[in-house]
Amino acid sequence: MIGADELQCARVAERLDRVQVRPDEFLVRAATPEEKRREANLWFFLVAICQSTRTLQGTLDGQWFRGWDYMVHAARRALRSDPETFTATRLLHVTGDELRSVFSDDGLAEHSTFDRIEERVAQWHNASRLLIERYRGDVMVLHETAGRRLRDESADHAGILARLSEFMAYSDPVEKKAFLFIMFAHRCGAWEIEDLDNLKVAIDYHIMRIALRSGMVQIQDPTLERRLKMRQLVTAAEDNLVRDAVRRACDLLVRHSHQSVFDVDSILWMMGRNCCFYDHDPCCGGNACTYQDRCTFVRSIAYLCPGQCLLDGVCLGSCDEAYRAYWETTLYTPFY
């Protein structure tokens, strides 16, 4: 019903090899044990509530941000005021107004544009409680208890991914938030991972949109194809099937390109929130980009943009309206 097209993935991989990912502006390299603890816990709690951030936007330190960018900059601001902001003991009883205050331009809860507050607060409460009960309130202890391995099927103790899945926020069977958190924890220097080959691209709605429109993932079910193109609701099981196929396609991209799993994730995600964004027509085919002044793709990826997407011409959607009509799955989910 749903499958990854290896030949098309190989074509896309060749395009990815034409660019280089710049250093991540969000990362702060951790050197001391205290810095590692602070950074790992920051990313753990921040990624835990990173789902559907479309409403979040505003101006911080004189610059306009949206979505994930806003979350990270607002979190960094909070950490500058109080290094213990993102700790289990602090967030165990956090209120909705306190969450809103962190993610607002001026620190006033009523000015925050964040939504789904009760859901996000519940995720922080659950994560804090389990960290305190099982890992002394510190995600660094989870890392060490798991033997620094993502998967450990043969050992008596579970790996990192199995342990994360016990948290409400990280219980997604396709493991989007888990992989995203681990990427940040590893790249900032907080976590060493013994089996990094088990790391996968974190599949969210941006990367789904790219995979479907490009033809890297093929939908053989006419009913599901129609519902995706018409942005109709799908079931959680169907969503998992689509995202699992997209994850397999991303594995093929890593295999066929010279890019790491980190860089494939960055390129596709940036492409989905800029060139192939949900608020405008994709910048390909006959559609020239008019968004260069606020494009975060060219800020994050070394790409001399000609006014069109990196995949223009190889992406099936850039040549065929039937593929360009695809959208990511539509459903309410706390997972991405």
Image: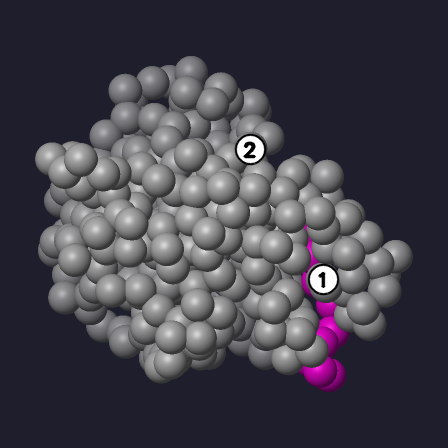
Q: Nearer the viewer, residue 86 or 229?
A: 86
User: Number of numbered discs present?
Assistant: 2
Query: Which of the 4 image quarters holds residue 211?
Result: top left
Q: Please state the horizontal and vertical placement of residue 316, each as a whole percent of the image.
A: 31, 46
Magenta stretch: give its range: 55-65
Which is nearer the N-term, disc 1 or disc 2? Answer: 1
The disc at residue 333 is 2
Q: Would you say 76 lies left or right of 253 here?
A: right
Q: Would you say 59 lies left or right of 72 here?
A: right
Q: Which secondary structure type mostly characterizes the magenta part of the structure?
A: strand
* Residue at image location 32% in from the left, 73% down from the top: 189
Could you tell me which secondary element the residue under label 1 belongs to?
loop
* Residue at image location 64% in from the left, 79% down from the top: 80
Q: Please state the horizontal and vertical placement of residue 64, each as a whole percent of the image.
A: 69, 74
Q: Which residue corresponds to mark 1?
A: 103
Q: Please state the horizontal and vertical placement of residue 101, each as a whole percent of the image.
A: 78, 61
Instruction: State whether residue 47 is above or below residue 332.
Output: below
Asked if residue 63 lies in the magenta stretch, the reply is yes
